Amino acid sequence: MNSGETSGAMQKTQGNGRTSETTGRITILMGLYDGAAHLDEQLDSFVVQTVSDWDLVISDDGSQDSGPRMVERFAQAQRGKGRSVTLIAGPGRGVAENFLSLLANLPQGTQWAAFSDQDDVWLPNRLELGQRMLSDLPADRPALFGSATWIVEEDLSSRCQSPRFNRLPGFRNALVQSIAGGNTMLLNRAGVDLARAAAAEVLAADTVPVTHDWWLYQLISGAGGQVVRSEEPTLLYRQHGGNLHGSNRGLRASLYRLKQVCNGELARWTARNSRALLTSAHRLSPDNRALHEQFAALRSLHVVSRIRSFRQMGLYRQGRVGQAVLWLAAALGRL
C-alpha cells in the first residue's frame, strides 16, 4: 500500500444478529428541491429500515412543489413513533452547499449521520449494513461507509448493479475519483465530528466542492480515517432526466468521462475540490497534505515533468478504462 493511504476496504462476515457496538441513533440528512414526484417512496423506505432508531433533517432548497407539505405530513406520522423529522430552509445555492450546511449544523454528540437523496428507495438493511461494517473500528477513528447500488428505471424496473470496484479505497484514489454516492454513505461519530468542523470551514471560506460525497471521501481518507465500500447494493438508484450521469456504467459513461477530460470539466472539478481540501488542509495527515500539494501543482508542470510526477504520486481510478482516461488527463494537463 502507498504511503499516506487509508487501510482500505474491510471484508467482514455478516451475521444475523446485531451487537451493542452497532447501536446508536442515526441522523438522516436529506436535501430537497422539487422532489415531490418520488419523495413518498423514499420516506416510506426509511420507515421499514431494520434500524428503527433514526431522526431525519431535511433541508429544502427552495421547492415550488408539494414536497415540503409532504414532509410535514410525514413528520406528524413519525412523531408518535419517537422520531424527530425536521424541515429547515436551505441556503439556496445548490446540492453540495445544501448538504454541507446540514453537516455544519449537526449538534455535538451526533452518533451517526446518513445521507439521502430525495428520489431513491432504500433497501431495508441500508442503515444496519453500514453500522455493522463500521462497528469494529476504534471510536476515535473517523470512518465512512458507502456501497454499490441497484440502478433502476424511473418506475423502479430493470435492476442493474452499479460497477464493481476492486481496488482498495484510499486518498490516492479519492483525489481523482468518487467511488460511492452520498445516498449510500454513513459516518460514525468521529467521522461526523471531522466532517462537521471541515464543512463549517469550507462554508465560511466559500470554497464549496463539486459534490459533498466526493469531498467526504477525500476528507475522511485524507485525514487517515477508514473508508469502507460494500459491493452489496443498499438502495434502488432511480435514473431519470435529472441524474442520468450518475449511472457510471457502459460505453456512454466512458465517453462521458472522456468528454470531461477534453472539454476541461474534469480539471475544473479537481481544481474546485482542491480548493475545498486546502481550506481544511490542517486536518489531513502530513503525508496526504504533501500529496495534495503535489497534486495541486501538477498542471503547472511541463509535460515531461508532469508525467513523471504523476507516475510518482501513484494516483489511480477504478477500472482499466478509468485509469486510461486518468493518464490521458495527466498527459494533456487537464487533471
Image (cartoon, rainbow, N blue to C red):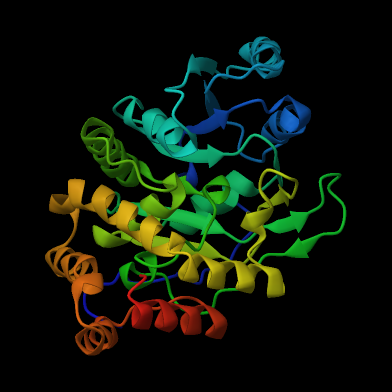
Q: Residue at x 86, y 58 (%)?
A: 158
Q: Residue at x 68, y 19 (%)?
A: 67
Vertical side of 303 occupied by 219: above or below: above
Vertical side of 235 occupied by 24: above or below: above
Quarter of the figure with the C terminus: bottom left
Q: Quadrant of residue 189?
A: top left
Quarter of the figure with the N terminus: bottom left
Q: Where is residue 83 shown, x and y percent of the image?
A: 57, 19
Vertical side of 173 occupied by 243: above or below: above
The answer to whether residue 85 is left or right of residue 8 is right
Viewer-side residue, 177 vs 183: 177
The answer to whether residue 39 is left or right of residue 100 is right
Viewer-side residue, 112 vs 272: 272
Q: Quadrant of residue 10?
A: bottom left
Viewer-side residue, 76 vs 11: 76
Q: How many marks?
A: 0
Whether residue 13 is visible, yes or no, is no
Q: Where is residue 156 shown, x and y percent of the image?
A: 83, 48
Q: Quadrant of residue 197?
A: top left
Q: Residue at x 52, y 78 (%)?
A: 322
Q: Residue at x 58, y 17 (%)?
A: 82
The answer to whether residue 140 is left or right of residue 174 is left
The answer to whether residue 229 is left or right of residue 271 is right
